[in-house]
Amino acid sequence: MEGAALLPGMDEPPLAAWDGVASQPGSDAALYLELDGWEGPLDLLLDLARRQKVDLKAISILALVDQYIAYIDRAEALKLEIAADYLVMAAWLAYLKSALLLPKDEQEDPSPEELALRLQLRLERLGAMRDAAARLMARDRLGRDVFARGAPEGVRVLRRNQWQCDWFDLIRAYGDVKRRTQPVVHMVRERPVMTLDSAIERVSAMLGVTLDWLELRAFLPPHADPRLRRSALASSFVAALELARLGKAELRQEDVFGPLHLRRVKA
Amino acid sequence: MNPDEQGPPDDLLRAVEALLFAAETPLSAEEISAHLEGADVKPALAQLQAHYAPRGVHLVERGRRWQFQTAPDMAHLLRREKDQLRRLSRAATEVLAIIAYHEPVSRAEIEAIRGVQTSAGTLDVLMEAGWVRVAGRRDVPGRPVIYATTPDFLNHFGLASRRDLPGIDELKAAGLLDPVDDAFDEAMEQRADISPEPTDSLENPEESA
Amino acid sequence: MNPDEQGPPDDLLRAVEALLFAAETPLSAEEISAHLEGADVKPALAQLQAHYAPRGVHLVERGRRWQFQTAPDMAHLLRREKDQLRRLSRAATEVLAIIAYHEPVSRAEIEAIRGVQTSAGTLDVLMEAGWVRVAGRRDVPGRPVIYATTPDFLNHFGLASRRDLPGIDELKAAGLLDPVDDAFDEAMEQRADISPEPTDSLENPEESA
């Protein structure tokens, strides 16, 4: 509200603060030129409309348009800075007025009456909320008009832990402790393995049978224990590399990670 | 005297009274009941409310939660300068009213009513005060955030529920909480019904000037 | 009924009631009076005290200052206990098991058996749970506290006595004492059983990816 408050030729004090209702009755002549005091052009229009002192339903839109335009003109004459949206509204209202004054059959679509009705409906809704806000703020408010207990003792909920543990957890925990701490004797278990020597022997022998490419897996013992198969695969692979190094076999792999083939190199 | 009140108050009534006096926040009937081994506390609440009605302290229900507070007519004695409420801007009070009467409501809907943009700070102030909260998103393109009031809002403004909002029934009945488009369609229909060739006051400025 | 109380409370009484209710600290009669244009508030204080005497909240005078407070027999309501289920940590379970198998046992002995330090909180938790108690002190230098289980412990774990705990041989039979290496081998064998062509994984990673 600071700055642009102007009272053209009147000695009334400026409004100290917005009080949520339309301006004082009888202040038509003393139209406050305070654009800062309004929340946009619709708010200004509502305030002007309220000065007509009739129900917003029965408001004269033409009179309202004149008042608004006069107001903006005065502000311009006083070289007040006017926000663009106020000027846009003024231009639109001037258009609305001229349209309303046209004979009915020359009016365009949408008809100016419809535009005026929409404006009136918007003003009514904004007015309703402005009044509702004022009534809300005037209620008995906690901490201003009514007070809660100043020094409440407080109600507390104490959480009591109910610990959960079952028999099996307990026994297993003891087993863990024992296992972790008992002296451990390490014994390497005998595992089924194929040694490199036996793999070289086996692969060379099998390569001797044919000149065709054979997949590495074909060299493995067919019905072995899975653990032996793993060992045999590793040993046979190394055996194949060894035979290739010695020039006794050649290796082929068509794509990365693809099956590995080998065949005998003719002596 | 209240007919409910004969002789000394019973222990359940005393217990509910003690709990509500001691509580730092409003308590729901369920919360009170949970402290009292699941007892049905509703009759005790009604009795207490009646007992305190003529006193300097009242028992009030706000958004289904109960609390004691000083009687409104004692305001002049209790007003304290030190904790004056921060004055809300006009924009903030209007936005708060629009949210309360229309909730849940998006920012665009608030702006449609006010005819101006709402600065981010305005909603922040209301949320900081604890009166407004984000209540999700509207299921329309853009999924705008929608706002609603909080239980603290009801508590602060002394409302038992949103139905207690001043004048809400009248506003609803007058269609003033409906969007302009709806009201416009309805008005056009009514006009068509009543007078096919309306001569309305809009064209007649002299009449109301 | 109190003879002082006839009909609705008067405004002075209500004002004193509201002031004391909203006050953040106890107030002297003089302070209350100062808020009420110097009215004599002593009769009102006496009336209020009598009115609240049978209720859940009392008006009490302490050192010439007045305040409302919860009736002493209702104070226990202001605290409510709520059970919260919590799982015993692994460390606490181990300590509990060691105490159960070796009781009475000192903390140093527990640590020697576990092979790791035991935080003080662990024993506190077990005592809070009601499963472990202090069973005296060991008659050795330093006289360390020794711990034992409680009847609640047996109860909770469904044991008639500590002799019902499985012995070392039974633990062994149940595989609970098997070294980790063996357990690992066993797991590997089980895996081999499930996938009969484990060799593929070497040559054909895509398949197992």
Image (spheres, coloured by chain):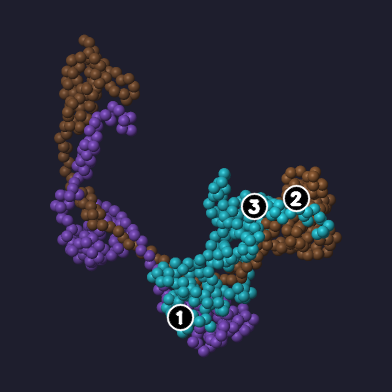
Chain colours: A brown, B cyan, C purple
Q: Quadrant of residue C135?
A: bottom left
Q: Write down the chain letter for disc 3.
A: B
Label 1 sits on a secondary structure element that is loop
What residue is pinned by disc 1?
Answer: B9
| Location of the C terminus of chain B (image quadrant) | bottom right
Amino acid under disc 1: Pro
User: What whole-number distance in Å separates the C-alpha atoms at marks 2 and 1?
Assistant: 67 Å
Q: Residue at x 62, y 60 (%)?
A: B172
Q: Residues within 10 Å of mark 1 (few under 14, many from 20)?
A: some
Contact? badges 2 and 1 (CB < 8 Å): no
Q: Earlier in the sequence, mark 1 or mark 3?
A: 1
Query: Do the dots labelled 2 and 3 sit on one chain?
Result: no
The part of the image, by quadrant, that contains residue C167 is bottom left
Q: Which residue is mark 3?
A: B182
Q: Which residue is mark 2?
A: A113
Which residue is more in the foreground, A207 or C146? A207
In the rendered view, tell whether residue C137 sits above or below residue C204.
below
Residue found at the very far bottom of the displayed protein: C3
The percent position of residue A224, horizontal first and vertical second, equals 17, 29
Tell which subunit mark 2 falls on: A
- For the point 18% across and 30% down, the residue is A228
Where residue A154 sits: x, y (%)? 47, 69
